[in-house]
Image: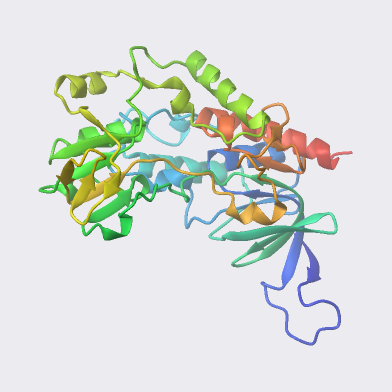
């Protein structure tokens, strides 16, 4: 990495710290999850020098991205798909036949071996606080070393920005409220009445777990979209294409699950048969002791468990003014990873590349398109 000018400017007598000096690289990749590692792999493969040409900044203590924070009951037997990173299969690092192996153990092992094998320049833990632009370069301000880059591949995903809709009375509730990202296991709820909010895959899976040990009530904004089919790659690609169309129009992306619905697996069929999936419509307000519907019906509860999804972690890019009046970002490029307003910025893990299979392809395309935009190899 080459040193750039100091924050303090020329002629300053004050000592310079690592917070004052920006290190010059061509590309900064923000995030070391599936999309970030894929992009890093292809940047190196295309001939961009690790460390000098590009770096990967990750705010985690260790490898594994969001996987290391998943709940303990998510094992290789019930995880919703694991896709190989480019150049190294999952089975080369982990015994994938051990179905009881926790995902929050197996995936970090895989990612760690991957980073070491390909000698990717991942710097951690380092948190990107803000990205600004000055004199045609991006200034990446962090809580540690600062960077100056010509281009950015943002791969921060969604895990760090959980979404909990603040219904009236939120602050009154005397019980516990938590989000999917805080879940550990069902045993922590034994003896409590848990209201589970949300109609996605995680909500249904965790409802199934928690209902085995305690009383549950399931609440969703819309009726659950159960579909009697087996999910396959073709359906996945069709769903991704629909999400891609939205972001190319500058609309906020929808989740792939909102397009595909919930396939009726044997586990879901068992829950349907046993009445676990007896869904209630969304309540109107939260009370001190539970929730209340518009018709006056009330239910007391000890826990409100929000499985209401995540938002893309893009606050550090706010100064670049990428979000439009529709609260979306207009995307372009082969796989809609390139910000149309500024082609020097790629968002992987956003919109159609939010799935793990989409993240791999997005990493490859983003690396190649950004190299071409910046004219790095000529």
Q: Based on the displayed image, in which of its 4 quarters is residue 131 positioned? A: bottom right
Vertically, is 314 above or below 208? below
Question: Disc count in the image?
Answer: 0
Residue projecting furthest to the right: 378
The residue shown at (58%, 36%) is: 252
- How is the protein colored in the picture? rainbow
Q: Based on the displayed image, in which of its 4 quarters is residue 3 positioned? A: bottom right
Residue projecting furthest to the front: 295
Residue projecting furthest to the left: 191
The residue shown at (18%, 28%) is: 276
Q: Based on the displayed image, in which of its 4 quarters is residue 186 positioned? A: top left
Q: Is residue 125 visible?
A: yes
Could you tell me residue 268's position as x and y percent?
Answer: 25, 22
Could you tell me residue 123's position as x and y percent?
Answer: 59, 57
User: Can you say which quadrant of the picture contains the C terminus?
Assistant: top right
User: Can you say which quadrant of the picture contains the N terminus?
Assistant: bottom right
The residue shown at (16%, 19%) is: 273
The residue shown at (20%, 24%) is: 271
* Residue nearest the observer in this picture, 52 or 347: 347
- Residue 205 in the figure: left or right of residue 107: left
Could you tell me residue 355's position as x and y percent?
Answer: 51, 31
Q: Is residue 108 visible?
A: no
* Residue nearest the observer in this picture, 114 or 346: 346
- Residue 340 in the figure: left or right of residue 312: right
- Residue 255 in the figure: left or right of residue 191: right
């Amino acid at each position: 990495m080459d040193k750039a000018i100091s924050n303090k400017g020329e002629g300053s007598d004050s000592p310079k710290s690592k917070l004052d000096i920006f290190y010059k690289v061509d590309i900064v990749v923000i995030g070391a999850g599936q999309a970030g590692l894929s992009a890093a792999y292809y940047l190196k493969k295309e001939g961009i020098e690790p460390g000098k040409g590009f770096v990967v900044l990750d705010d985690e203590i260790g490898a594994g991205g969001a996987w290391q924070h998943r709940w303990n009951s998510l094992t290789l037997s019930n995880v919703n798909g694991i896709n190989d990173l480019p150049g190294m299969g999952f089975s080369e690092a982990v015994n994938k036949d051990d179905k009881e192996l926790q995902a929050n153990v197996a995936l970090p092992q895989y990612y760690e071996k991957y980073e070491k094998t390909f000698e990717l320049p991942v710097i951690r833990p380092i948190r990107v606080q803000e990205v600004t632009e000055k004199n045609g370069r991006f200034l990446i301000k962090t809580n540690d070393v600062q960077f100056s880059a010509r281009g950015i591949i943002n791969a921060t995903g969604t895990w760090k920005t959980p979404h909990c809709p603040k219904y009236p009375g939120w602050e009154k509730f005397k019980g516990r409220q938590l989000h999917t990202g805080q879940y550990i296991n069902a045993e922590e709820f034994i003896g409590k009445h848990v209201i589970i909010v949300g109609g996605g895959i995680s909500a249904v899976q965790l409802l199934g777990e928690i209902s085995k040990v305690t009383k549950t009530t399931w609440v969703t904004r819309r009726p659950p979209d159960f579909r009697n089919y087996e999910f396959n790659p073709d359906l996945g690609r069709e769903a991704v294409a629909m999400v891609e169309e939205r972001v190319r129009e500058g609309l906020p992306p929808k989740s792939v699950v909102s397009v595909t619905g919930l396939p009726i697996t044997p586990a879901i069929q068992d829950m349907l048969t046993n009445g676990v999936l007896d869904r209630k419509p969304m309540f109107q307000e939260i009370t001190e002791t539970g929730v209340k519907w518009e018709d006056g019906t009330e239910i007391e509860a000890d826990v409100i468990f929000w499985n209401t999804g995540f938002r893309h972690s893009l606050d550090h890019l706010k100064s670049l003014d990428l979000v439009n009046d529709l609260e979306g970002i207009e995307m372009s490029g082969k796989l809609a990873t390139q910000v149309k307003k500024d082609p020097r910025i790629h968002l992987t893990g956003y919109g159609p590349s939010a799935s793990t299979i989409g993240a791999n392809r997005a990493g490859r395309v983003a690396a190649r398109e950004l190299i071409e935009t910046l004219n790095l190899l000529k």
